[in-house]
Amino acid sequence: MKKLIGSLVFIFALFLLVAAYSFSNSILSPSSLVSIDEREKLSETTFSEFALPEPEAIRFQNGTLRLRGWYFKHSKKQNCGVILLHGLGKSRNQMMPYAPIFWRQGCSLFLYDARAHGESDGSSTTYGFYEKMDLERAVEYFSEIDNIPEDRIGIFGLDFGGATAIQYADGQFEYGFIIADSSYRDMRSWIEDMFVNQFTEASRIVTPLSLSISELRGDFLVNEVSPVNTAKLITKPVLVLSPSDSETKKTDSEIIFSNIKTKSKQIVFYTMPNGDSSPIQFPSIEYETAIVNFFKEFRLGK
C-alpha cells in the first residue's frame, strides 16, 4: 500500500513539474496566451490613414539585444516627445491608433517592439524587469536623434507597456511624464488571474511553481516586478487610465494610483468603444480628451 501511495505521489509531483514547466513557456513567451491580430488589422493600412508621415525605421541596442521600431519626427514640434509601449504579446503596430493623439499635441513619436516581441530580439518576456532597462536606452536614443531633452520625453503604455513605464519611473531615470493604461499592480497577481481566465481555477495549484521556474529560466525576480511598489517613487506627472467595465483592471489602477505620492497625478476611467466592422479601433473622444486635459493641466507640450 505504501508503495502504491508513494508511486501516486511521485506521478502527481511529476505531473505538477511538467505542467509548471509548460506554463512557464506561456509566461516567458506570452504570444501563446494573447491573440496577435493587430498586424492583420493594420496590414492593409498606410501611415497616412493615421494622418502621420512615413516614419524612419530605427534600430537601437541594449547590450547585445537589438530592438526595432519607428521614429516620427514632428515638423512643428512643441518641445515634447512620446514613446509608445505596446501590450503583452503585441507589437508596435498596436500603438498606431493612439499615436495621432500625441502627434496632434505637437510631439515627435517613438514606437518599438519590446524584447521577445515583434521584430525585436530576445527570447523571454520579464514583464518590466529588463524591459525598463530597454526603455532607458530608448529614451537616450530618442533624445539623441530628435535633439530633445530626456526630461521632455513622455511614456505612454498599455497593460504590459504601462507597467513597464511605471517601473521605469522609479527615480533612477530621466523622463517627462507617464501615462499608464490598464497596468497590472504586480506580475504575480496578473499571471494568476491570466491563468485562471485562460484555463481554470485549478491552475492556481501550479502557478507558484511556474513562476519559480520562469525566474530561473528568465534570470529575473518575479516579486521585484511590482508597479504598485514603484508607483511610490514617481515624482513627475502621471495619468492612470483604466476601462470602467473591467473590475480587475479598475482595482489594480486604483491601488497603483493611491500609492503615487506626487500631487501631479490624475486617474480616469473610460468606456470601451463598442465593436464595429472597421479593421482599426481608434480611441474614443473621451479617451483623447482625458489625455489632452492632462497635457493642459501640467503644460506638457510647452
Image (tube, grey):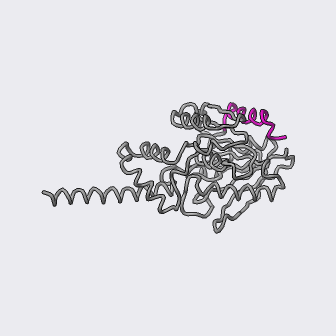
Relative depth, front residue between 51 and 211: 211
x, y percent for residue 166? 64, 46
Tell me the residue at 26%/59% (across/down).
Answer: 11
Q: Quadrant of the N terminus?
A: bottom left
Up-down relation of residue 153 to residue 251 (above or below): below
Residue 60 falls inside the magenta stretch: no
Name the chief secondary structure element in magenta. Answer: helix
Total labels drawn: 0
Which residues are the magenta region?
283-302
Name the spot of residue 71 as percent of width and height, x first. 75, 55
Residue 86 visible in the picture = no
Residue drawn at point x = 46 percent, y = 55 percent: 26
Task: Give how far across and how far down residue 219 sits, in percent.
Answer: 52, 62
Up-down relation of residue 204 to residue 249 (above or below):
below
User: Percent from the top left, x then y, of residue 150?
Assistant: 78, 52
Q: Is residue 225 above or below residue 105?
A: below
Image position of 154 with respect to 113: above or below: above
The verdict on residue 298 being magenta is: yes
Say if residue 12 shows up in the picture: yes
Question: Which residue of the protein is positioned furthest toward the bottom in this rendering?
Answer: 64
